[in-house]
Image (tube, helix red, strand yellow):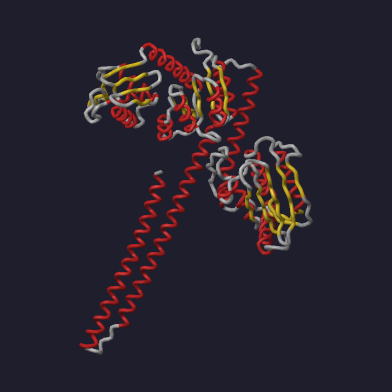
Amino acid sequence: MKRKHSLLFLILAFIFAQIAWMGLLGLWIYWYVSNYLIFKQVGDKLSPQIALDSPNVFVFVGGIILIVMIAVAMFFIFRNLTVQMKLTRLYDNFIANVTHELKSPLSSIQLYLETLNVKDVSTERKKDFLALMMKDANRLNKLINSILEISRLEQKRIAHNYHVFDTNEVVHQLVENSAERFRISKSALTVEGSIQCKCVLDKDAMQIVFDNLTDNAIKYSRDPVQITVKISQHPKKVLIEFGDKGIGIPQKYHKKIFQKFNRIDNKDIPNVKGTGLGLYWVKEIVKLHGGKISAFSEGKEKGTNFTIELPIYRTSKRFYINSLLRRTAKKEKEMEKTDGE
Amino acid sequence: MESNSFKGSKILLVEDEETLAVGLEFNLADEGYIIDWAKDGKEALDKFNSKEYDLIILDIMLPYFNGYEIAEVVRGKSPQMPILMLTARKEAEDKIKGLELGADDYMTKPFHLEELLLRVKGMLKRKVWYKTSSMVEPVYQFGKNKINFENLSCSSESKHFVLTQREAMVLKYLVENKGRIVSRKELLENVWHISSEIETRTVDNFIARLRKYFEHDPNDPKYIKSIRGAGYCFED
């Protein structure tokens, strides 16, 4: 509420400032024109030698340029401020989500420790509790790692090991790894289509993309989860479509979900816990590969389709893809050197 | 541990974190309570609408409906249901929001098991005390005002209305301490069960509301008097 008011105040201040500038400009023009005519008439009568034009026009034009510059500068300041406000809001969201994500497993671990300390717990139950504690400890570890990954991603250090792969083979492998990691049966995560082309990617980074998409499909699907990965080849690009039969995403959020710290706040969508970073990473990693990602959903309960576009090796974005390979080769050489020493 | 006289009380546990819910269920069941676990807002409302409970333990960040929304629905239907909010949010404004919407108590994660169990017991005890004391003398009359502490319905000179649980509790505390000066701190501790570090303005807001309901001239109160620098005093 407070924020809404302050934004309204900002917009009003901005409009008011613009009106003030324009008013001043109008007054100025009016003053100049009326005085100029009087000066000219009087001046012509009194002494035709006095030249009034040149210095006045310079001041007049200079003044207008300055005012326009101030108006433009104000516009930029205003735009920056609104962006800053939006960022602060998203950051607050992030802190609230992370706090929640940290505290929940922590309180659960504390609860079990206190229970084991105070209560008489059977050996069997003890084992259950220890398993649950391990689960929470893993969750904490995962969360801390993902927060640390932010800075790596921001510095573009998350993907650095680019190699040429057979697209078909590598997609199958990435999907299999994700299925294994999230313990999904082979029938629930299937790959359709077969293509004959190569693409350049960092396998570890691309695994993060596939893991995140799989994790989301599980989180936002009513049981049982069903994921289909379709691969298709186009003249210059490879399309990897990652579709689930989950609860879907309303159209207005199709782009927003990729923004940093953004999480959908909608009654129809269960508020699954998270940091609001997963899809932002996905987008950034795909971008680093010279590709694009988009989301599409026909609506509520109609599933979601994520489409990843990757450039085909030696067919498109040659310069960029080659620079990625060169960078990796250079790094590998340096590594060999240090290993040799 | 002393024997629990509230054994068999039915508790609705609304918590979406499975690991935490399992631990809480074990401990509460060990105390003799009967636990029903709802893992999201929808399930919580379904269960609340279909069964009778003695207490609700409520998380705030939940799928579908958050804890605040659930508290509002519960309050609307059953003003006397004790609600214990259990959440990771620690900010004073979250606490105040929860309490204003009808939570009776608020605990932040991570919490201590024994403290939680004591609070649950305390809340069940208060519920019974409220019920029995209301049953003995459910209707209280002062001046032209009448309040039924059981169903919280009131009537003043010309209007009929229903108090919220919290308003009723503030009034009840003042009535029970008739003629004695009750400080804001005392009210916060006994009605809200929170430390007085939180703004005492919350208390003033409730007193202002009660005066609007019951006083002929809220600016010159006859029943709920302000004692400068000390608190409030109820006089019949």
| Residue beneath the point at 23% across and 24% down | B222
Farthest residue, direction front: B158
| Residue beneath the point at 70% across and 42% down | A227
On screen, residue A63 above or below A118: below
Percent across and percent down for residue B56 are 50, 24
Name the quadrant of the C terminus of chain B: top left
- State whether residue A313 appears in this view: yes
Camera-nearest residue between A283 and A230: A230
- State whether residue A116 appears in this view: no
Residue A309: quadrant of the picture: bottom right
On screen, residue A119 above or below A295: above
Is residue A182 shown left or right of residue B35?
right
Camera-nearest residue between A289 and B139: B139
| Residue beneath the point at 52% across and 42% down | A265
Percent across and percent down for residue B226 are 24, 26
Percent across and percent down for residue B23 are 58, 23
On screen, residue A89 above or below B87: below
| Residue beneath the point at 60% across and 52% down | A284
How many discs appear? 0
Residue A74: quadrant of the picture: bottom left
Is residue A41 shown left or right of residue B127?
left
Residue A111: quadrant of the picture: top right
Percent across and percent down for residue B5 are 49, 11
Is residue A98 shown left or right of residue A186?
left
